[in-house]
Amino acid sequence: MQGFPLIIAFVIAIVIMIVAISKWKIHPFLSIMGISLILGLIAGIPLVNKTLEDGTVREGLANVIGSGFSATFTSIGIVIILGALIGMILEVTGGAVKLADVVVRVVGPKRPGLAILIMGWIVSIPVFCDSGFVILNPIRKSLVQRTGVSSVTMSVALSAGLYASHVFIPPTPGPIAAANTLGVGENLLLVIAMGLVVSLPALLVAYLYATFIGKKVKAKDEADFETVQQSYEEIVQSYGTLPSGFLSFAPIVVPILLMALSSIASMAKMTGTFGDILRFLGTPIIALAIGTIFGVILLISTKVIGQFYEVTNKTLREVGPILFITAAGGVLGRVIAQSGMVDYIKENTTALASFGIIFPFLLSAILKTAQGSSTVALVTTAGIVQPMLGSLGLESTFLTVMTVLAIGAGAMTVSHANDSYFWVVTNFGEMTPQQGYKTQTVVTLLEGIASMALITVLWLLFR
């Protein structure tokens, strides 16, 4: 099956998958893997590797499933493990409680959702949103226990804050790649400045929705507001003396700084040994490994280093389900990419080209929803749109920059089961997949539309 019928089959498959998970209570891992296999068969992916007439080899379905599964582990598996380990260390030592205390003192106990939203927005400028959520999750959880605010509100606010800068603000790779493809790579400062501007409506609508949905949906780790202060004081007393602010922040802040320096080195095209060292240290796996070392120092300083083995073991048990469900989402994305559906969408864009700057937004949103990766949507859409800039009336520097951001707005619309970030947020936020659609999927839709509304206004003013 190819062409438009394949898109219909994809939509039906996603609906069946949602029903299987939420209504039939089939485990998400089995539901996603089963739908991936069925969709691959319907799409006509060969059962085994096939050599085409031009000499290229088309992967067989088994290999597609295997490569989709392993690629997810390669890109984010170790990051999830190390990030969760740091979080567990912060919980055991009382470091997470100390972090929550510091945040509450700075922003006040009445605005933790706004604090975590802005924190995520800043952190995700140099750090991928998946990694950022894992790194900041201990602070989110502690703020829930510290203030009694809705866990769902905090998860949605953190997720949305991270996502806004992830698709709009360099040095995140997606916006940089799109800017270079469209010919404004030398104007990154303008891309950054306008990215900051157009991300603001996304932040506003995300905060409002996070506050609203937190009253409707309840996660497994909600705090009881009536007893939160009493229980919090008991928690503090159970640790005796809390660790210092520096040692508590180091396992989180040091990896973020290292990844930021790596992004700066890449953006500045630094060469030589020093540039290589910065890029190496800023690789998420290495940065989080260094953060883990600071976590061990925290264990030593609080005299609980004897629990390190138990903490590691518990971490691996808890992240196992997260890793496998996330990898299954990677399989679905890989099957869709190999099905030919994305190629069909790319080849049939003429009808959308009359929409001006709305065209790259719609195309990017279609690609994002179909295959799951925001970065792939950004890069692919930029490649399609680049030769059409003149016919779309978007050839001026400013409008080309706005085109980059329109593609970014589409690349956040929407996050669902074939997006690894969806599973990171729902699992670490202790929500069911059904709750994930009400929270993560809806907030990304609202963010994309809100930002695109401002982009459209600017396009109308300056075209």
Image: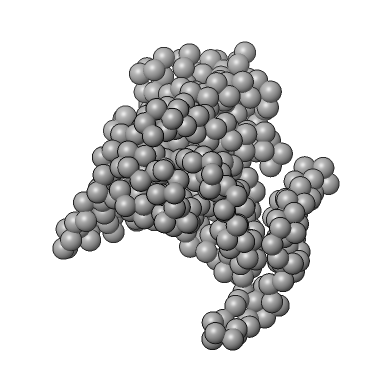
Quarter of the picture holding the C terminus: top left
What residue is at 70 percent from the left and 65 percent from the top? 2
Task: Name the foreground residue: 345 vs 41.
Answer: 345
Residue 90 point in image, percent of width and height: 43, 38
Closer-to-camera residue (429/264): 264
Q: Residue 434: percent from the left, percent from the top?
A: 71, 39
Which residue sits at x=24%, y=49%? Answer: 186
Task: Tell me: 187 left or right of 312.
Answer: left
Looking at the image, is 333 positioned above or below residue 141?
below
Residue 105 placement: quadrant: top left
Q: In which quarter of the view is residue 58 placed?
A: bottom right
Quadrant occupied by the N terminus: bottom right
Q: Residue at point 21% right, 56% down?
A: 269
Q: Is residue 240 visible?
A: no
Q: Is residue 325 visible?
A: yes
Residue 436 appears left or right of 252: right
Q: Looking at this view, is 176 or 4 the one in front? A: 4
| Residue 354: x %, y % from top left | 54, 44
Q: Is residue 118 above or below residue 67?
A: above
